[in-house]
């Protein structure tokens, strides 16, 4: 039975489309991601806009007062803030939406955390970064690109090295 030449062209078209989609998806996955300009409002009422923080690295730590791993992460974050805050790191702990604001405020009053606490009552910030589990860390480079997202307790040495690199880039 002779082959239909149109059948071969259809397969070639399908294969070409598959290759094009694969290349496009790879480019999208590997291209730098820039979060939108979010407004971070601390429990003291201070507002920070991500675009205004360009030129310095930003660390967002998503947490909740009833999350045991989040509470174990606090001393790590305090040390990072103490060591890198004076050098330009901007760090914010973002309370996830299900954590009642009054509980977050009460917790931070009794535990001096040493870095700004942001409420996210409707989940805008968490949704922007697809936060499904906590603790979750987001590191944004001085140029505004998302360079790290980590769920769970961090590798402290690796996180510190990454922050050091970003601080050096911000100074350049």
Image (cartoon, grey):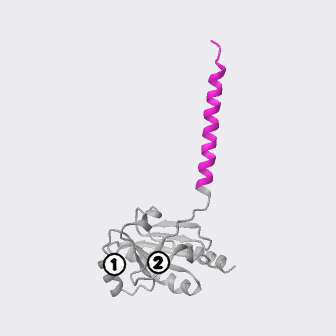
Between residues 22 and 67, which one lies in front from this camera angle?
A: 22
Please state if 104 lies on the left or on the right of 169 as rendered. left
Is 20 or 46 nearer to us in this picture? 46
Query: In this orientation, does residue 160 appear?
Result: no
Residue 19 x/y as whole percent: 63, 41
Please name the predominant secondary structure of the magenta segment in the image: helix
Q: Secondary structure at mark 2?
A: strand
Q: In x, y percent, where is residue 42?
A: 42, 80
**Of residues 161 and 58, the one drawn nearer to the viewer in this rendering:** 58
Taking 70 as reference, is 32 above or below it? above
Would you identify the image quadrant in which residue 5 lies?
top right
The image shows residue 108, relative to residue 143, as above or below, that is below
Q: Residue at x 33, y 81 (%)?
A: 105
Instruction: For the C terminus, give its image quadrant.
Output: bottom right
Span shown in magenta: 1-28
Q: Are marks 2 and 1 in contact (CB under 8 Å)?
A: no
Look at the numbered disc 1 and give the secondary structure of its residue. helix
Q: Residue 98 placed where, x, y %? A: 32, 68
Task: Characterize the local packing of mark 1: few (<14), some (14-19) or many (20 or more) Cα atoms within 10 angstroms.
Answer: many
Residue 92 rendering spot, x and y as whole percentages: 47, 78
Residue located 30% across and 73% down the image: 100
Q: Which residue is mark 1?
A: 104
Q: Which mark is residue 92?
A: 2
**Residue at (59% x, 49% y) in the render:** 25
């Amino acid at each position: 039975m002779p082959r239909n030449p149109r059948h071969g062209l259809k397969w070639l078209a399908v294969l070409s489309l598959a290759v094009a989609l694969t290349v496009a998806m790879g480019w999208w996955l590997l291209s730098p991601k820039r979060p939108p300009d979010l407004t971070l409002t601390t429990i003291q009422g201070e507002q920070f806009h991500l675009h205004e923080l360009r030129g310095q690295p930003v660390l967002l730590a998503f947490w909740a007062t009833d999350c045991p791993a989040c509470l174990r992460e606090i001393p790590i974050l305090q040390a990072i803030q103490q060591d890198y805050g004076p050098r330009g790191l901007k760090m914010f702990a973002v309370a996830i939406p299900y954590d009642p604001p009054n509980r977050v405020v009460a917790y931070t009053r009794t535990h001096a955390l040493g870095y700004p606490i942001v409420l996210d009552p409707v989940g805008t910030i968490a949704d922007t970064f697809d936060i499904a589990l906590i603790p979750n860390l987001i590191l944004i480079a001085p140029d505004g690109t998302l360079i790290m997202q980590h769920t769970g307790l961090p590798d402290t040495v690796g996180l510190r090295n990454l922050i050091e690199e970003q601080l050096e880039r911000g100074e350049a």
